[in-house]
Amino acid sequence: MAIRKVFVKGEEILTKHCKPVREITPRVRELCNDMIDTMRDQDGVGLAAPQVGVMKRIFVAIPDREDEDNVYVMINPEILEKSGEQECVEGCLSVPGYVGHVKRPMTVRVKALDIDGNEQEYEFSGFGANVICHEYDHLEGILYTDIARDVMTNEEYDKLLKEKEEDLKRKMSVKGGMSV
Ligand code: NI
């Protein structure tokens, strides 16, 4: 087990197109396991190889909120199909302290090699599709801040949520407590 250093926005490697993995060697497996450890250590739901300074097409992800023990390792992933649309609130271990609103597909179908080199095909919707698209973008050198509608600090976002909540309460009290 090894925790690796997470590179943050401003580092050039996060803007690079990553290279396919040619062979799943013990070193590649070690990298995958270290990425899982690093993701868990930082309470993340996804981590891509360039975030730990390696320009390879690999990411690890926890796309199912209900099953956080289920970690997916995706090597040379390809997005086969995207459908629908959703607005997501995203953060990134490489952009600490910030969140932003990003439009993502509602459903994605993805093909990838697992850690044993077996080709797998998956379909994810909602949160899972969001996580997979975010991680996939890292392999293309794209950070969510490059495509977000807005980016704000965690504090600003908390304030925004509170304002929305108060606004809703006010509206409800005008309507005599009816939830409409
Ligand atoms: Ni990220």
Image (spheres, rainbow, N blue to C red):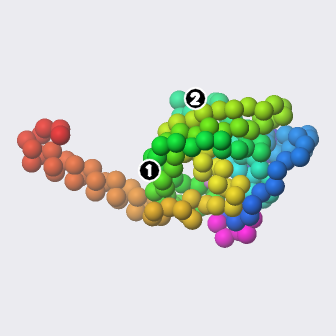
Q: What is the CA distance from the residue labelled 1 to the residue labelled 2?
A: 23 Å
Q: Is residue 84 above or below residue 65?
A: below
- Which numbered marker is on residue 67? 2
CA neighbours of label 2 inside 10 A, class few (<14), some (14 to 19), many (20+): few
Q: Quadrant of the C terminus?
A: top left
Q: Earlier in the sequence, mark 1 or mark 2?
A: 2
Q: Residue at x 15, y 45 (%)?
A: 172
Q: Which residue occupies the foreground of this view, 27 or 20? A: 20
Which residue bears the numbered disc 1?
87
| Amino acid type at image mark 1 | Glu
Residue 19 part of the magenta segment = no
Which amino acid, by three-letter code, is at mark 2? Answer: Asp
Q: Nearer the viewer, residue 29 or 120?
A: 120
Q: Provide residue 107's location: percent of width, then percent of height.
A: 53, 39
Query: Left of 28 or right of it: where is 46?
Result: left
> Which label is found at residue 79?
none
Local SS, label 1: strand
Which circle, 1 or 2, is nearer the viewer? 1
Q: Quadrant of ligand 1?
A: bottom right
* Range shown magenta: 9-14
Report if residue 51 is visible in the image. Answer: no
Looking at the image, which residue is at 73% across and 31% down?
Answer: 120
**Ligand 1 closer than 8 Å to label 1 CB:** no
- The answer to whether residue 97 is above or below residue 24 is below
Left or right of 173 in this view: 46: right
Residue positioned 19% across, 47% down in the render: 169
| Mark 2 secondary-structure assignment | loop
Q: Is residue 5 above or below residue 33?
A: below
- The percent position of residue 41, horizontal first and vertical second, equals 67, 45
Residue placed at 84% from the left, 34% from the top?
117
Q: Position of residue 123 (x, y in %)?
A: 60, 33
Some atom of ligand 1 lies within 8 Å of the CB belonging to the residue at label 2 = no
